[in-house]
Image (tube, rainbow, N blue to C red):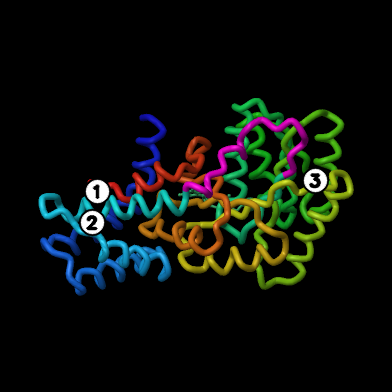
Amino acid sequence: MGLFEKFKSGFKKSADAFTSGLKEIVVKKEIDDKTLNQIEDYLISSDVGTVAASEIREIISQKKIDPGKEISSEINKILKDYIIDLMKPLESQVFFEKKEKINIVLISGVNGVGKTTTIGKISKILKSKDNKVMLAAADTFRAAAIEQLDNWANRIDVDITKSSQGSDPASIAYKAVEKAKAENFNQVIIDTAGRLQNKKNLMEEYKKIANVVKKIEPDAPNEVILVLDATSGQNVINQVEEFNKIIPVTGLIMTKLDGTAKGGILLAVSKKFKLPIIALGLGEQEDDLQIFESDKFAEAFTNIQ
Ligand code: GDP
Ligand code: MG
């Protein structure tokens, strides 16, 4: 299976629910107000967000639909164009390229969204592009979290800096960067604990990690990647807002797009924040990560089966 096919099949649940819903709405041969309302409601229920949903509704209502063509495929084309217009500028494939100068990446996000798993997957891609990768096990909250990252380091065959449960996360991040500099690594990926954005002390700890690595590398963290779980629905909007307040987020990764019919949340996030989208998680295995490309996303999202 090619990457694109894999992407489509991974994303099938989201796409199917989305497009079969649309299809049901537009079996009629004309687009009247009632149909437009239904389309807008359907888009909102797919987590596309009210702003994008009303914009799409407006575009559809303005558009002269060719009566010789099937309305559902015409609407899909409108949607696809809308998605590409919105998301093309958010592509950030440069994230994975080989960096000349050391690149320090802080991975953040609430508990269970898929941070540690995503670190394993992105490390594999980074390594395949000739990056020398060091992981930092700065989620010291649970022993299992350190072990989980350690397993990924072994599986992907990259280095890891770790310590015991309960040790200071900032000092692990510091040690990882120190070692990476001394040994010519060019990527340091820092795993963090699932910080609930309303837990002040955890947020302070997160800031401390960033401040401590600055002592070695003034520009660090070079990237702050927020991991979002597609199945969390509209909560992700709030997560982006809260995390962005602590340390400005430089890129997003959305996980679990394989398991939800609510993939539209990525559109809502794009519309609201215009943040670069690094990659999409489509499963639990090491190859289940798709570097974000807007046209592939649009194609998969609007693909009528
Ligand atoms: P963390 O707490 O943010 O570090 O999250 P983990 O990396 O431990 O992942 C939590 C759970 O989500 C694990 O069971 C992962 O296997 C699963 N997971 C992570 N990414 C994906 C994904 O893209 N798709 C699916 N279906 N599961 C995922
Ligand atoms: Mg974790």
**Disc 2 to disc 3: CB gap under 8 Å:** no
Disc 3 target residue: 163
Q: Nearer the viewer, mark 2 or mark 3?
A: 2
Q: Is residue 84 magenta?
A: no
Q: Secondary structure at mark 1?
A: loop
User: Dots 2 and 1: beta carbons under 8 Å?
Assistant: yes
| Location of the N terminus (image quadrant) | top left
Task: Tell me where the magenta segment starts and ends, as one range.
Answer: 88-104
At a point 58% along the width and 45% down the height, the residue shown is 117
* Horizontal and vertical percent position of residue 120: 60, 39
Look at label 3 and name its amino acid.
Ser
Amino acid of disc 1? Ile
Q: Earlier in the sequence, mark 2 or mark 1?
A: 2
Among numbered discs 2 and 3, the one appearing first in the sequence: 2
Q: Which residue is mark 2?
A: 20
Q: Is mark 3 within 8 Å of ligand 2?
A: no
